[in-house]
């Protein structure tokens, strides 16, 4: 069988094509930080573009026109639109890249620095064969500092030394830039605290800065400020509840150990494919005692003591409630969730979970669980060897395999992989299936948001 090989567009080529595309459609932008290694290296795990909100549609059109840039995720907040791209090499161990289009520089919807002022003072920078726009040193220092400080209430040591140097050398310019939003007293106190390097004193400025920004914004533009705050919280609430911010993939296999090994290999490959990439196992409030999943299809099921019927049924209901709660609440970003097991395992192989309730109840409840966006079945018996396996494998194992195959083929979106092949090849095929599903879903989301299809390459 042909070996799958992953290939990627070099970061420098992608970045040059994207900035050319943005220039061609008239989008004003600035690269906010971490551009010192361009074009050979991207020092961060993402790229931050500052653009005007009115330019977002044109910026997305430019991004989608870049050859070999497959969009696999999109999440739009009140202040930033995050795009996740597969097939960009940066650094070599990562297969995906996050591109953030920052739409305003704000805390809770209230701007601490205007995009127009940043664009007016922007500097043209050359790196190799690339040319692109970056903020002035004053604006870059303010943005690098305030992103974690004002918004998150913490200091990011990665940028603090550079921010401190800029605040010291450009003290009057920094104060002038912050003065309209924070006032002279609050601004001067903050700038001098940063220059002095007293972290505790700097952190003590957070509350006064937020209060000053809120009061000044409300006094100057009361209606617009209130609407901006309401929009911010409504947007964040929707992200936590909306099913559109969660992508789920479930791997099925009678060989639990093999499935877990494939998932462990997939996790580093899927980094940066979404805001959060996580592996999940069911965590009901009433836990099942799961037998070790290192068994093979040739092993006889082990007899174990099972709890009573009512206890088992209560555990299944607990599992159902936990799954729906994790599906609907608590998401802070676009999330890719890889399930290491699912409710159907309980139906096909109840002994593994020591389930002692009626089979009809487990089947009924399993139909109520949230359905993944993609099912991947790791079939331990190759398609061509299935007839031979009927002569070798025990009847119970054969029945279990047929139940898995019948279930997976009844799903809306699934792939069946030959798990008898080398593990690296199986992992690559599982990765390709996941990326394909993410790309299809992202394309539908972008079509609904911008009323346009991806331009042909």
Image (cartoon, rainbow, N blue to C red):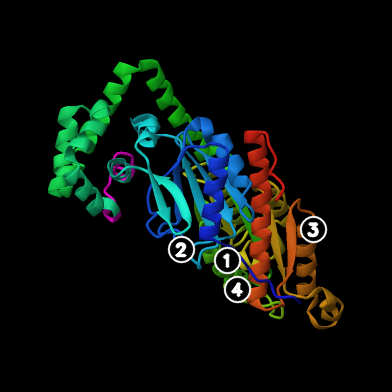
The nearer-to-camera label among 2 and 4 is 2
Q: Alpha-carbon distance for marks 4 and 3?
A: 23 Å
The nearer-to-camera label among 3 and 2 is 2
Q: Foreground: 40 or 395?
A: 40
**319 relative to 424, above or below:** above
Write down the region rendered in magenta.
Answer: 145-158
Among numbered discs 4 and 1, the one appearing first in the sequence: 4
- SS for dot 3: helix
For the point 64% across and 46% down, the residue is: 65
- SS for dot 4: helix
Among numbered discs 3 and 1, the one appearing first in the sequence: 1
Labelled disc at residue 117: none
Among numbered discs 4 and 3, the one appearing first in the sequence: 4
Q: Quadrant of residue 56?
A: top right
Among numbered discs 3 and 2, the one appearing first in the sequence: 2
Q: Alpha-carbon distance for marks 3 and 2?
A: 45 Å
Query: Which residue is under mark 4?
Result: 257
- SS for dot 2: loop
Labelled disc at residue 409: 3
Query: Which residue is under mark 1?
Result: 266
Q: Give the x, y percent position of residue 385.
A: 83, 79
The nearer-to-camera label among 4 and 1 is 1
Q: Quadrant of residue 186?
A: top left
Query: Which residue is under mark 2?
Result: 40
Q: Alpha-carbon distance for marks 2 and 1?
A: 26 Å
**198 relative to 416, above or below:** above
Q: Residue furthest bottom?
A: 392
């Amino acid at each position: 069988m042909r070996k799958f090989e992953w290939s990627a567009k070099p970061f420098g080529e992608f970045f040059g094509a994207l900035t050319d595309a943005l220039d061609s459609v008239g989008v004003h932008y600035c690269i906010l930080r971490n551009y010192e290694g361009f074009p050979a290296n991207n020092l961060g795990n993402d790229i931050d573009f500052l653009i005007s909100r009115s330019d977002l549609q044109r910026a997305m059109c430019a991004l989608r026109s870049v050859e070999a840039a497959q969009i696999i995720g999109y999440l739009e907040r009140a202040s930033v639109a995050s795009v996740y791209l597969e097939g960009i090499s940066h650094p070599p161990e990562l297969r995906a890249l996050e591109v953030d289009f920052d739409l305003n520089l704000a805390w809770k919807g209230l701007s601490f620095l205007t995009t127009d002022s940043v664009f007016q003072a922007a500097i043209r920078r050359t790196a190799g064969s690339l040319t692109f726009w970056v903020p002035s040193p004053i604006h870059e220092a303010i943005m690098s500092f305030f992103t974690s400080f004002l918004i998150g209430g913490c200091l990011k040591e990665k940028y603090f030394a550079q921010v401190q140097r800029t605040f010291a050398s450009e003290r009057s310019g920094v104060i002038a830039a912050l003065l309209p939003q924070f006032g002279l007293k609050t601004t001067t106190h903050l700038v001098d605290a940063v220059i002095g390097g007293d972290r505790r004193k700097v952190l003590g400025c957070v509350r006064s800065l937020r209060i000053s920004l809120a009061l000044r914004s409300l006094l100057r533009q009361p209606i617009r400020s209130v609407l901006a705050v309401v929009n911010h919280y409504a947007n964040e609430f929707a992200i936590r509840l909306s099913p559109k911010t969660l992508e789920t993939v479930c791997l099925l296999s009678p060989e639990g150990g093999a499935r877990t090994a494939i998932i462990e290999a997939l996790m580093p490959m899927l980094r940066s494919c979404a805001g959060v990439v996580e592996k999940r196992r069911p965590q009901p409030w009433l836990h099942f005692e799961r037998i070790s999943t290192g068994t093979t299809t040739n092993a006889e099921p082990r007899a174990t003591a099972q709890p009573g019927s009512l206890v088992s049924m209560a555990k299944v209901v607990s599992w159902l409630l936990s799954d729906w709660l994790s599906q609907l609440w608590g998401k802070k970003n676009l999330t890719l969730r890889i399930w290491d097991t699912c409710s159907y395992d309980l139906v096909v192989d109840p002994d593994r979970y020591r389930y002692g309730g009626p089979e009809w109840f487990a089947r009924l409840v399993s139909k109520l669980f949230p359905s993944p966006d993609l099912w991947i079945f790791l079939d331990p018996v190759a398609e061509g060897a299935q007839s031979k396996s009927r002569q070798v494998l025990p009847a119970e194992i054969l029945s279990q395999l047929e139940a898995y195959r019948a279930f997976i083929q009844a799903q809306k979106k699934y792939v069946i992989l030959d798990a008898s092949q080398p593990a690296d090849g199986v992992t690559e095929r599982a990765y390709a299936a996941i990326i394909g599903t993410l790309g299809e879903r992202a394309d539908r989301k972008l079509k609904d948001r911008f009323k346009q299809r991806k331009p042909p390459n």
